[in-house]
Amino acid sequence: MPLTEKNLPLFIDLFADATGVGKTFSAWRIRYHCDAAGIPTTMVRIETRGVAQRLRKGDVYIPVEDFAQASQRPGGLAGILSPLSAAIARSAQTRGITIADWAGGLAQHHAAFLTTTHFDEQLASLGVTGLSIVATTNRLDQMRQSAENLRSLATTAPGLHRALLLNERFGKFEFMGGSGPAASYRALLKAAQDCDVIRFPAVVGESWKYAEDAGLTMPQVMLSKPAEFAEKTGLDPFTSAACITEVAAFWALSEQVLNRVLRFRAAPAQ
């Protein structure tokens, strides 16, 4: 069953062992989905210093480097992540959504945080619904890690809803029968058998990268005319038109997918 407005306030996080699986891209796509419903969101970015932080006013940034100071904080890692806890508490008051984007490689820290804080119980005490999303591409090692993360999540925080994000940025999840990747994919789907599955198609070519490098959001790309996109990216108008088309195609397909998991009513037109 999809989560709806009745499940607000809501906490959503995305994590993975690997980097480059599209967590941040997906976190923003989920945020845009919430924007369309008029639901207030707070993004909590847990990332290393030096990585560009594209955040809105009121969002939260927690440097991964601060984890090294956990032994000097009350509650250890929970003390470092207290800004995340504060954001969740605020969303409980506003009936909004907190979206936490964990940097790649922090799956063990994620599990430790959930375990030591009895995270699902804390959310329940605040009246907040929790959804934890494990992200992967079609690469063999990432699928294996994601299956383990899903199993771990079921024991460390059984009160959370779980979802598997299949990001097709490196190709579809289609494998030759009898191959190692095919076996790992079957094992992954078995681990996710009681989870929602979010399958994000790839944005063709480098279309989104050029838009992102130009500082454009996905809604801004779709509202752009080819000449406007060309001026901001340095591409020619024909290529710009194709980029806009590809981003819009991803938007439409991903919206269908998200509505199966997060089914919110569209906000009234302004």
Image: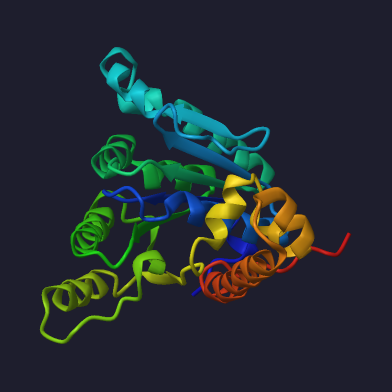
Q: Position of residue 72 (x, y in %)?
A: 30, 12
Q: Position of residue 264 (x, y in %)?
A: 65, 67
User: What colour scheme has been applied to the protein in the rendered image?
Assistant: rainbow
Q: Is residue 146 above or below residue 64?
A: below
Q: Is residue 235 above or below residue 115?
A: below
Q: Is residue 64 above or below residue 173?
A: above
Q: Position of residue 165 (x, y in %)?
A: 39, 64
Q: Is residue 9 visible?
A: no
Q: Nearer the viewer, residue 127 or 46?
A: 46
Q: Look at 38% across and 23% down and name the residue there.
A: 79
Q: Position of residue 64 (x, y in %)?
A: 36, 29
Residue 5 figure quarter: bottom right
Q: Is residue 233 visible?
A: yes
Q: Residue furthest right?
A: 270
Q: Look at 68% across and 69% down and name the residue there.
A: 238
Q: Is residue 148 above or below residue 188?
A: above
Image quarter (top left, top right, bottom left or bottom right) of the C terminus: bottom right
Residue 54 figure quarter: top right
In this rendering, position of residue 28 left or right of residue 227? left
Q: Look at 22% across and 54% down and name the residue there.
A: 152
In this rendering, position of residue 26 left or right of residue 242? left
Q: Residue furthest bottom?
A: 177
Q: Residue furthest top?
A: 72
